[in-house]
Structures are given as C-alpha cells and as structure tokens.
Amino acid sequence: MADSQQTVTLTIDGQPVTVPAGTLLIEAAKQASIEVPSFCYYPGYTLQGACRMCMVSIEKMSKLQTACTTVVANGMVVNTQNAEVVNGRKAMLEFLLTNHPLDCPVCDKGGECELQDAVFRYGAAETRFVETKHHQDELKFSNLVYYDRPRCILCYRCIRVCDEGMDVNAYGIGFRGSHSEIIPNRGEELECEECGMCIDICPVGALTSGTYRYKTRPWEMEYTGTICNHCGDGCKTTLSVRNNAIIRANNRDHSGFNGEFLCAKGRFGWDFVNSEKRLTAPLVRHNGSQAASSWEDALDLTVRRLQGVMEKHGPGAVAVIGSNRTSNEENYLLQRFARTVLRTNHVDHHRTADFSTLVAALSESKATDRYATMQDLGEARSILLIGSDPTHQHPLLAFKIRQAVRDHKARLYIVNSADIKLALRQAATFVKLGAGEEAMAVRDLASGDGPEAIGSLREKLGGESDTIIIFGDEVQGDSIRELVGWGLSLPGNTRFIALGDYANSRGAADMGLLPGTLPGYQPLSSEAERSRYAAVWGAPIASEPGRNLRQILEGIEAGDIHALLVFGSNPVKTFELLREHLARLDLLMVSELFNTETTEFADVVLPAASFAEKSGSVTNTCGQVQAIKKTMRKAGTRSDLEIILGLARELGSPLAYRTAEDVLREIITHVPGYNVALPSLLVGRAVPTRPNGAPPALERNDLVISSHDTLFTSGTVSRFSWALNSVNEAKRPHGHIF
Amino acid sequence: MLSDDLKSMFDRVIARYPLKRSAIVPLLLFAQDELGYISDEAIEEIARRVEVPPIEVVEDIGYYSMLHRHPIGKYNFQVCTNVSCQLLGGEEILAHCSKRLGIGHKQTTSDGQFSLEEVECLGACCGAPAMQVNYDFYENLTPERVDRLIEELKANGRAR
C-alpha cells in the first residue's frame, strides 16, 4: 500500500508527524499516540466509512473528515480535539444510541465494549431521542453464534472479516435504513466455518458466543495467554477462567502471529478440558476389570511390572509411545527417561509429518535458515503448496495464505489431488493430480520431466523468487530431499514448511521422540552425540537402535515387547491394534485425559493434566517455539512431566528436575537449534528454531500418516467437545467447502 | 426451474453492463416476472452468473421492497397513501381494499389471487388516488371502482 521510500509530514494537534506516504490519517494519529475513536475501521480489512466516529477537523476542508478513509498529505494540519470534533463525536454517539439498548448490565460485552468505552470517553450524558426504541428479538444463527439486532451498530466488521479474512461470505446486510440488520447466508441460519471471528471482531455485544453468552462478566475472569492445543499452527489464545473452569477462549490482546484469528477449534473447542468425562483418578486392572485407585498404587503397580519385564526379558522388551500434544519438556524428558532409566531406544510417536527428512535435507545443504515462519507466510509473494488441505487442517496457515494473496498479490501455486478451496479460490495455478501422485509430481518438478502442467508450473516458479514451499504428509522421505534440492535451486530465499497435525507434532520430533534420533535430530548412531547427551544426563545411552512405532506394534504381536507405556496417544485407534495382541503385554500403561480405545485395554490408566493445566512450551509446524501457561487446576490429574518424574523416582533413578522450566533450560543449553532466548519465550513471543542435524532416513512409508482432521475434529479430544459436535457443519462430508 | 428464455434474457442483460454485478437488480426483476417471486434457485443462478456470493443477491432483495422472496397474489394491489393520494382519499381506498379482500398490508388472500401493499408515491399524483396492480395503473379511484376492478379481475383476468 504505502511506498516506503516516500514520507509525508503533517501536523496533528500541533505535533509534527512523519509517516510513509499512503498512510491513513487514523494510523498516523495512532503513531503519534493520539487516539481517534472508530468502530467500523479495522486494520487489515477494507475501509468502510460507515460509523462516522473517526471524524476530525482538517484545515482548509470545510467539513469534518473521516480519519479512517483520509490519506495523509504533506502539510496537512489536523485537529482531533477542537470543539467541532468533540461535538461531532457526541452527536455520532447520540445517534448510535438512538436504538441501541442500554442493557449493558447484562450484555456480554459490558466492560469490554468499544461503544461503551467511547460513550464514557466522548459521549454526552443526554439524548434528544424520546421515541420508543424498536425492540427485536435475538436471533440464533447457530449453536455458537447469536445475533442481538438492536445492539448492532452496522459497522460491517463481521461481514468484512468473513468475506476478506475467511473467504466464507456468510454475512450480508439485509433490509434498509433503520431496519437494516446483519443476515446469515442460509435463510435464518449460518452455514460457515464457525470460526467465531465475527464475535471477536464485533465492537459491541451484537454477535455473541453460544458457549460464553450470559455466563460471566469480563472482570470476573482470570486471563492467561497460552497456545491452542489443537492443530499444528500454534495460535495464541487467551483462556478466560472463572471458578477453575475455562469459560472463553479468544486471542484477547491480538498478540502473536495469529492476531485476531482463531478457528472453531481454537475459539470453542477448548471445552474438552471442562468435560465431565475427564479422568480424575488412576485406573488399575484387577482380575480383568479396571477400578479407580490411588496414584501411589497405580505408580507402584506400573513400576513392579516394569521391573519384572526388565528382569525377565531385558530392557529391549519395553517400549514407549509419546504424544503429539504434550510439551517439549515432557517429550524431551520422556525420551530421556526411556533411554537412560528404562535403557530402551524403543521410543516413537504417531508421526504426522516427516520433519526429520526436512531437517536432514536442509542441514546437508547448509540451509538451516530456510525454515519459513507463520509471519513469513503472511508476507509471502510466491507460495507453492503440495498436498494437504490447509483450510480444514491448518486454518491459520490458510488464513495467512489468503492474507498474502489479498494484501501482497502473492501468487499461489497448488499441486493437489483434491479440489481444495484454496485451489479453487486463491490459486494462480492449480495442478490437479490423481490420488497419491504427489510424490511423483515432486519428482517431476525436481527432474524437469513429466507432464506439461508440471513443466509449466516449474517454469512459472523459476520466474518467482523467495517462494515458500509447503507440503503435507503426501510428501515424505526421499520426496522431501528431491523437493528441497530443487526448491533451493529456485531464485531467491526459498523457505519450507512441513505440515504436521497437532499442537506439538513438531516438538515431538524435535525433542527426539524417535527411535534413532536424539533431541535436535542428532543421530543415535553417532557415538559423539551419544556421549554428549550421556554427559548431560549423567547416564549412558544404549547404542542398540530402537524400534519405530510399526516395529513396536509388530514386536507386541510377535511377543518381543512385553511392556508398553503410552503417553497422550491412541495407537489402538490410529494403527488399528488388535485386542489379542495387546493382551500379550505384561504391562500396558496409558497416560490420558479420557477413556479411549487404548485405555480400554490398559492395565494402568493415569489421568493426565491437559494443556491448560500445565506450563511448558510447544513448537508449531513451522518450528516456532511458544510458551504454554498453566491456567487452572484439575483435581486428581498430574502432568506427564510429574508422571515421568514419579516413575523414574519409583524405579530408583530420580531425575534432577523439579519444574518444566528446569527441563527447558537444559533443552536451550544442549539441544542444537533450540538455543532460544528464554525471556523472549516467557513474554509470549514465537521464537523460531533452526534445527541442524543428520537424523536417520525414514525407514518405511507407513510411519508418517496425517489424521486429516477437519475444522471440527482434533484426534481423540474433539469427541469430548460439546461445541465442536454441536454445529451442523460438523456433519458435512470431509473437505466440504463452506 | 428457470426457463431457457429467462436464462437467455440473463445473458443479454449481463452483456449490457461493464460490471456483471450491476445486472443484479434487472435480473431479479426478470426472475420475479417469470416466477412471481424470487426463489432460492434464482438467487443461486444469478449469483453464479454475476460472480458474487449468493448473500449479496439476498442483500439486494432485502433492500428493495418490490422484490419478493415468497409467492404473492396473482394481482398485487399497491395502494399509494403519499401526500396527493392521501388528500384525495388514498387511505380510504387502502382501508376499502383491506376490508374487501380481507387482508392487510403485505398479505395475500388464501386463494392466492390478491395481495395488498401500502406504497409510497407512484408518480401518478395527477390521477390521485391511485394504485398499481402488477404493472398497470388505476387512477381516480373510488371504493366502487375498486369493487368493479376486483370483480373484473376475478372474471377476466384484466380490467380497464
């Protein structure tokens, strides 16, 4: 928009202000710390000029001007405080209040309402309007979105965020004049992504949340900024807690790379934390059936069985499956516990993206500065997306792609076997493949052979620079090497993003929840790395290669694995394990939030704390680390960190950490690529990591499998969310375009 | 189902405008002439042709009170009660229509024959009180003339 080469100097309230040419007056005032009130103006979206609240007086202009639509000019003399402006604001507020109900004492927005604040600051205490207010009943647009018509001030923010930000176009303005109101796209109802952006962006209490409305007052809640636990994008969210229960999630201060953005899962799908189905006491199997037990008995039984298995069959008979959602600290600790306390390298997790090969390929090419961040994506000029459907699986990533296309005219190139929404609506070029042909397409791109469509795509990308290449689980193993090799040959600073499913899929790989990989993608086969970590941990590390997840499952079937510890994972569902195979285990211990297909077979089930009940850090799919913060307590549960430390202690090998921060300090000091600034992390920044290592190659092609979640599913936990299951859209077929 | 004639009319109308979306209102009028109202199918079809989200077409329908989302009577009585007509008995004409047809403003008789609407100036002040029935004007109305008109419409489908 603005040409950064040229600047303009103007005077606002007697203060000289210099800003880039093209800046809007309202933004120039903001830079000079002068507040110009507005309702319809929202940075990042088109200008509306609807509310007339931002009117200011400009010398040599006969009438008041709207600061949100006026572009600054050299020598402009602006006054935002004179009597004319003050009276104008009073009049505008009086007008907006003519039919606005003064039900602030019961309105959800009361206390954090932009209209209320503006009236307090700029309004008059009187109204000349004496007619009866026109009351209309509230409308229910969906289970999650309600609309109170008289409260609406028709600022069009909801319409613009839905059209431009979300590309869903679910809202319009119906009727005319004083009868105007917001109308949804399906008669009396909404059919949309249910992201709730309209609720968040509403300056008044017109659009309210089905999960939050009439529950509390904003000042009665405690706010904690943390990271959403669903997909791998890593949106910041503010969990609002009252009486030890989460009542709302929104990115309250709009900090972080997601700004005002959250999807349905982020905004409404946290309610699994409050679910009555949460496990709150350990379960121990006695004579075939599970019964509640104390933590002591559960840990005691686990440890006795573990010791029995290790004595009888050796440490190679024990295997550990970690989680995609637990913190970096827990993942780091879990693999350390497995390798040094249990003395087994049989440790893996449900991999949803082949991060290892991306790291290996970039490290070999000495290009570890080529991991793209979420912010990079929003600023990109050229994007290549291979596989995946970000609109459903990575809502923020899709939002950022749309932002790049909208704000920077980015060219979006898509290679996919499905007609995904981004391909139909934003792509400059869409190469449609047959199912499963992504790897072949990558080979063709890299080699220059193949069909014409790929050849022409190759040519177009050769004319771009600084392309960001994004790929899903369709591209793994050698395909990634080919893609990176070719990508780095493209002009400019090509960067890469591998798409993994959950909040800490990336962190699980980064922290070494992989059999042959130590934290930071260091190969277990390297004696130097083994002894380096052995020195850090004060214990030797076995050199025998570990089993990967498939081999662990095969080992259970073959009777080689006798004890399995599962943390926050549901392998029975994900990998279709058989009951009779699991019955061969001497010990199946599962740490979980809920009863799942896996806990059903467990000898010991430990009730784990959710992301809201512990502190630590998670790494998003781009490799950016962010802090998660403890928001509330859940009686009866323990964090996986406490569970692992407890097991180690009971096994007679206590580990010298007390808090997640102790573990984090060790990670920062010793894990390559993770030497992030702790203060940055703790104040809520997203700190990029630059892993650099030589992890072993991907052993087989059935290890990396994305769950292909939708906007309303999130592995096992979404089953326990009322909100995500309550919307009609959740019943739509997979990949439905809203 | 929209007729082929209507669809080819859509093509011709859209071609007249530099911006496709400018054709929304005329397309809606043609659709309403054929269907008697604007159906969901018509909204989808128009939105597709002028390349806007369907909600934008719905917005326009809401804005113009002469566009209908539901079927109305075969004969739509639009009685003017604006200044000139009001001075010469427009309100009485409206009241008479209402009594005679047994329906109020924006209502339709149960046999689907007649609808009634109170409207603003029809631009027929010289013949006040006036009303418009579908696209035809009737001026210098009296309750008797209205009765006769209703009978003629019932009998012949047209009146003069």
Image (spheres, grey):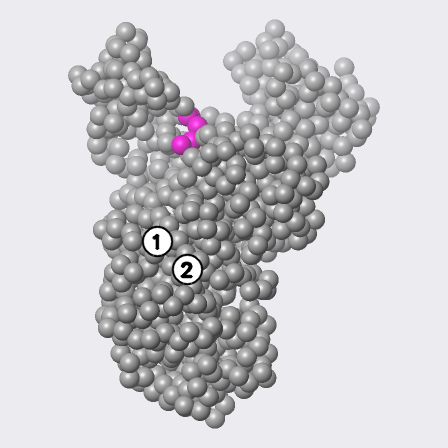
Relative depth, front residue between A293 and A180: A293
Res. A521 mark: 2
Mark 1, secondary structure of its residue: loop
* Residue visible at 66% across and 36% down in the picture: A455
Quadrant housing residue A16:
top left
How far is disc 1 from disc 2 in space, using C-alphas? 9 Å
Mark 2, secondary structure of its residue: loop
**Was residue A46 drawn as part of the magenta stretch in this picture?**
yes
Q: Position of residue A417 (x, y in %)?
A: 65, 48
Query: Which amino acid, by three-letter code, is at mark 2?
Result: Tyr
Residue placed farthest to the right in the image? Answer: B156
Res. A673 mark: 1
**Image quadrant for the N terminus of chain B?**
top right
Q: Are callouts 1 and 2 both on one chain?
A: yes
**Was residue A49 drawn as part of the magenta stretch in this picture?**
no
Q: Position of residue B83 (x, y in %)?
A: 52, 13
**Stretch in magenta:** A44-48
Q: Are marks 1 and 2 in contact (CB under 8 Å)?
A: yes
Residue placed farthest to the left in the image? Answer: A14
Q: How crowded is mark 1: few (under 14 residues within 10 Å), some or many (20 or more)?
A: many
Chain at tag 2: A
* Residue visible at 59% across and 62% down in the picture: A701
Q: Position of residue B160 (x, y in %)?
A: 76, 15
* Residue visible at 44% across and 28% down in the picture: A46
Query: Which amino acid, by three-letter code, is at mark 1?
Result: Gly
Relative depth, front residue between A696 and A428: A696
